[in-house]
Amino acid sequence: MSASAAEAAEYHSKDFDWETLRQGIENDPSLSHHLLPFVSPQPEQQLPKDPIKAWQSFHIQHSSGKFFKERRYLLKEFPELGCYRDGSKVLEVGCGNGSTALPILRGNENIIIYACDCSNETLQRAKEFVAASNVASVEHRFCPFYCDFATTGFPKWLACEYCRENFEQKDQNCVSDVRGKQTLETDSWSIEERSCCIGGVDFVTLIFTLSAVPLQIMPAALKECFSVLKPGGMLLFRDYDQRVGFREYMRSDGTRSYFFCLDTVRNLFIGAGFIELEIEYCCVKSVNRRNGKNMQRVWVHGKFQKPA
């Protein structure tokens, strides 16, 4: 068994119970610091960056590839990505360096991933990371493009207005077999003039992405994801877990995180029109290889569907 396969096989998501962990922290005075609210930097301490520039700087700082490791657990958590029909399309929102796209491309040689990010520098690294993987036909199945989905929405070549209206009517008449051509100058994909769009996508992945969006625009961002999904399509979600105290936090480098609880996630997705298929805390024990310290890590895991 290869090292990557062994790592994925050893992955667990139910190593402990969230409520047991919460009660243990609340009852142990030595762990009371975990219950304190975040202390965001004072305005005079914060760097004067807009969110996009902050994330660009973040990815440049962590460009070695060691910070974001390939997420080999994804096909165990979301097996739908590995067994779906030929030619299925995935929209990966906030692709970073490609650590989410690569295991999906490995696990399903017929899947096509349209991957967006708000940093052209990050997209370039993602292309290099994926190209170096020797995954079969990856140059035709990994399609990165620039997009700040939370503020501008997705480009119409993903799903044109005609398709989006037909999705609402549960009737697809638009071309869905479009081949794009990459425009390296903008790290985006353009659709040939004879076709209107790719006809929407079968999956949207939001893996540690939504938490980087300001809370007040999360509902609109999720409705945008909903609009490009085909009827019956699925949105696969994983993000930071619940934390007692203030949940929204801006780091000193200008990047943002939001720590979710199940009810918040549920309300956001149902409010955007999704059907809840699965939502739970993912509880994993891991060991820091550098210092040997045991860690208990918690994320929110969810699967949501657009009505068929």
Image (cartoon, helix red, strand yellow):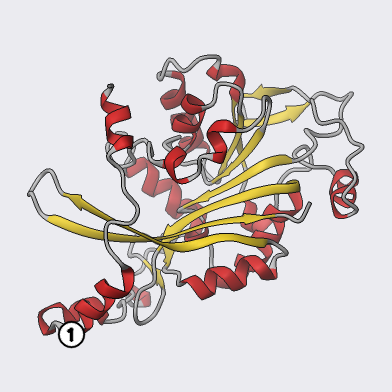
| Residue highlighted by disc 1 | 27
In the image, 254 versus 216, the foreground residue is 216
Q: Residue at x 51, y 14 (%)?
A: 136
The image quarter in which residue 21 lies:
bottom left
In the image, 305 versus 163, the foreground residue is 305
Please give the count of numbered marks on the rendered protein. Answer: 1
Indicate whether 295 appears above or below 183: below
Q: How busy is the neighbourhood of tag 1: few (under 14 within 10 Å), some, or many (20 plus)? A: few
Where is residue 120? Give x, y as percent. 53, 37
Under mark 1, the amino acid is Asn
246 lies left or right of 195: left
In the image, 116 versus 278, the foreground residue is 278
Where is residue 35? Give x, y as percent. 26, 81
Indicate whether 56 appears above or below 143: below
Q: Residue at x 79, y 25 (%)?
A: 177
Q: Is residue 97 visible?
A: yes
Q: Residue at x 90, y 45 (%)?
A: 171
The image quarter in which residue 285 lies:
bottom left
In the image, 260 versus 249, the foreground residue is 260
Indicate whether 284 appears above or below 185: below
Where is residue 190? Give x, y as percent. 74, 29
258 lies left or right of 288: right
Indicate whether 299 appears above or below 93: below
Q: Is residue 50 visible?
A: no
